[in-house]
Amino acid sequence: MKLTVDASIAVKWLVAEPLREEARRLLAHRLHLHAPEILLSEFANTIWKKARRGEIEDPQPYFDELANLSGIVTLHPGSALVDRAARLAVEIDHPVYDCLYLACAEETAATLITADKRFANKVAGRLPTVDVRYLGAPGVPDEITAAATALIIGRGKVERLSVAYEFLAATHESVVGALRAGNDLPPLLTPVHQDLILESPSFKRLVDMIAGLSDEERVDLLALGWLGAGLLDGDWRRSFEHASEMAGSVDHGYVAEYGRHWRAGYARVARLHACEQPPADSSAIPMPPTAAASAATSAPLQTISPAAEHPASSSSVWRTMAVARGCRSTTGSCAISPG
């Protein structure tokens, strides 16, 4: 999903102030963020003002993070936006600076998310070509979370993988049954017996199917397995975020171990978001704005430890949830216009 953000959002990614946790939800790796280049100047100016007012002790660490911002947000040159921004400024009687964000949202066909309530209220309903949302409005943070955690993997693939797992389970039962030989106690599988299962055509087929998934589909499959098994308190957002961290470091056999839970996990996601099941050939489950989002603990810049917040992340503090940098966005249905 594509979204445009302004400086009022970017500042909250690093500064402890109201709506900070909600703003940091926008750092999810399945959300594609856009902004005009003026975002950098406005961010720096806001930090300077906060330092001048004594709200932060040392502005330099914040300025140092400017270099990382272009890796999080796609920045668009003002020269390509200023003409349209000027026209919008005249139309709604508002400064051109802010209208650059409107022009960017219009150009990228993306919803504009802002923490500036007055700006959002002024624009609301006046520009049919731009959807502007105030971050603090009821439901908006949940819409963001729903879009950020919408499934990429389709129901059809989940079903085919589940059927393949059932073949593997049957192979396992066959081996166990042969060893049981009338004994009610479950037999102890030796390495030789385990190899019979791991080298079976059913196991190899399932592992090959998992290997054939995209990186994002494997994230979904791992998270669905955990969710269906009731791990991580049965919380979809936690399951998804932890799977995003771990999917690249676990082998396909580990993912396969949770195969008996994939259907249950998928059903729980569908119920959680109160949406109808998509067609079997659908590539994503639509995620409406009713998705429940669990709050993350906020911390000022001085206490942020990227490794502690996100063990598999890069050294920048900008993204607290992004691990797989080259991921594709979802086409899930959401009240925020999908990209």
Image (tube, helix red, strand yellow):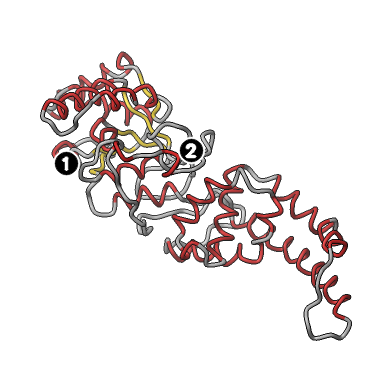
Q: Residue at x 50, y 65 (%)?
A: 268
The amino acid pointed to by label 1 is Lys
Which of these two is toward me, 151 or 326? 326
Q: Which mark is residue 117?
A: 1
Q: Residue at x 32, y 31 (%)?
A: 105
Image quarter for residue 189? Answer: bottom right
Label 1 CA crowd tier, 10 Å (few <14, some 14–19, many 20+): few
Residue 31 vertical position relative to residue 175 in the rendered view, above or below? above
The amino acid pointed to by label 2 is Ser
Label 2 CA crowd tier, 10 Å (few <14, some 14–19, many 20+): some
Which of these two is toward me, 132 or 320? 320
Residue 101: image location, x then y, percent: 27, 28
Residue 118: image location, x then y, percent: 13, 39
Q: Is residue 204 left or right of residue 243?
A: right
Q: Please give the residue where the numbered disc 2 appears in the rendered image.
A: 313
Quadrant for the N terminus, please.
top left
Quadrant for the C terminus, please.
top left
